[in-house]
Amino acid sequence: MPVQESPCGVSDRVPGPSSGSVGGAAEQQHSERASVVSASEPVAVGGGATGTSADVVVAGRGVTVVERPAVASLEVVSGGISVPVEGPPVSVSSAGARGSRGRFSDAGAFVEPGREGVWEMLRLSVAPATWSHYSTGFRVVSAFLFSRGWVPGDVAESFLEDFVLDSSRAGVSKRVVQGRLAGFAFFCRALGWNCPSSGFIVRRLLRAMGRVVPARPDSRLPIHHDLLIQLLSVLPDLAHSPYESALFQAAFSLAFFGALRVGELLVSASDRARGRGLLVHHVLLGDSEVRICVASSKTDQAGRGQWLVLHQVVGCVSCPVARLSEYLSVRVAVSSEFFVHADGAPLSRFQFLAVLRLALVRCGEEPRSYGTHSFRIGAATCASAAGMSEAGIRRLGRWVSGAFRGYIRPSGASRGRGGSSMGL
C-alpha cells in the first residue's frame, strides 16, 4: 500500500482509513444517559463516557439533543479526605496526621510562596487529563501515607511497598496502582522529594500483581467500515434537517478514515483556549483529496502538527472527500470551529456520542459496547485486516509506541457486518 508523505506529518494511502494518560480507578466518573423516544416506545441508551447528561428525543424523523450539566459524582469521605474512587478503595487507617490530610490533599499546597508561576507552567507541560490523573494519584497515595504516619517530604520505600500490597488485597488492578504511583512520584519530583517508586521491591510487587490478576482487555468494540456505512445511512432519518445529517455524516467519516481521537476532531471550551481541535483553516479540500492538519494531540503536546491526506473513494457513500464536500457546501461561516451546527454552535463531544449511540440502536447494535474511540479502533483493525504493516498502522493513528496493538481486534470481534471488508 503506498504511503504518502506530507510536509507537516505522515499519512497513509490505503483503501479504508487514511493517514490512553494513565487511567485510574480513582478517577471521578460522570455518567451520561440518552433517552430515545419514538412514536411507540422509549429506548434507553446508557453510557459510561464522561460528559454532561442529556435528553435525545426522536419524534418521527427528527432528533433533538439537549445538554444538561453533569450531576454524577462518586466520592469516599473518610477522616477529612475526599478521595474519588472506582471500585474497591485502598484500606487507609484513620489514625495519624488528621490535621494535615484535608489541607494537603493537593500537591500544590506544598509549593513555596512566589513559585506559583512555575507550578502553572508545570501543569501546562502535560495534557489536562494527565494532570487530573496525576493529581488523583497524589491524593490517594498521600492519604494512605498519612495514615501510616508519613510527614510530607522524602518517602520511605517501605511505605510504597505497603501501598502496593494493600491495593492488591483490596482488588485494585495493577494498572490503576501504577497510575497512582506515577502521579504521586510526578509531584514528589516536582517538589524535590525522594520517591523510590521504581525500587526493586515495588517493581516486583507490581509484577506479581500482573501475574496473579491479568489486566482486563479493552471491551470497546470497533466500528468497521461496513458498520460505518450503516451508520451514515440511518443519519438522515435521525437528523432534524439535511444540515445536521451532513454534519454528522462528515464527522463520522472523518473520525474513521483519519483514525482521529475525539479531541482531535472536536473543539471544547478548554481546547479552544489551548488551540486544540479541528478548525476551519485545518481543512484543505481538493478535487480528489482532503488535507487535514492535526494541530495538537495526545502524543503531540508541543503542537508541532501533522497533516493527513485522505483520498477520494469513488462511488462509496463513506468517501471522506464527498462527505466533507457536502458538509462544506452548507456549512455556516460563523465560527472558527470546523464542525458546527446550523446556529453556529460547535458540535460537542457529548452530542457526537449521543447521536452515535442513537444511530447504533437503529443499526441493531448495543450502544454501550461502543464509544468515540470505536472509530479509531475500527480504523486500526481494518488496516491490519487489509495487510498494512505495523509501521503503517502506527503512522495511520499517529502512535509513537506499540500501544496500537491494543487497538487491533481479532476478526469477528465486532457485531458489525463484514468486519474485514472495506466496502471499496
Image (cartoon, helix red, strand yellow):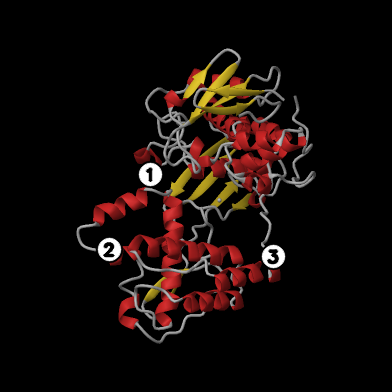
Identify the mark nearer the N-term, 1 or 2.
2
Identify the mark nearer the N-term, 1 or 3.
3
- Return the mark for residue 270: 1
- The part of the image, by quadrant, that contains residue 58 is top right
Classify 10 Å Cα crowding around label 2: few (below 14), some (14-19), many (20 and above). Answer: few
Residue visible at 48% across and 62% down in the picture: 182
Residue 39 or residue 108, whichever sits in front: 108
Between the C-alphas of marks 2 and 3, the distance is: 38 Å
Residue 394: give x, y in percent of width and height. 63, 38
Q: Is residue 272 left or right of residue 216?
A: left
Amino acid on which the number 2 mark rests in the picture: Val
On screen, 98 above or below 164?
below
Is label 1 in contact with label 3 (beta carbons under 8 Å)? no
Q: Secondary structure at mark 3?
A: loop
Q: Is residue 412 visible?
A: yes
Identify the mark nearer the N-term, 2 or 3.
2
Residue 182 or residue 93, whichever sits in front: 182
Residue visible at 59% across and 70% down in the picture: 172
Q: Secondary structure at mark 1?
A: helix
Select label 2 or label 3 by which is in front: 2
Q: Secondary structure at mark 2?
A: loop
Residue visible at 60% across and 41% down in the picture: 356
Between the C-alphas of marks 1 and 3, the distance is: 36 Å
Name the residue carrying label 2. Answer: 111
- Return the mark for residue 403: none
Classify 10 Å Cα crowding around label 1: few (below 14), some (14-19), many (20 and above). Answer: few
Q: Is residue 38 visible?
A: no
Residue 281 or residue 95, whichever sits in front: 95
Question: Which quadrant is the N terminus positioned in?
Answer: top right
Residue 36: give x, y in percent of width and height. 59, 47
Name the residue carrying label 3. Answer: 214
Select label 1 or label 3 by which is in front: 3
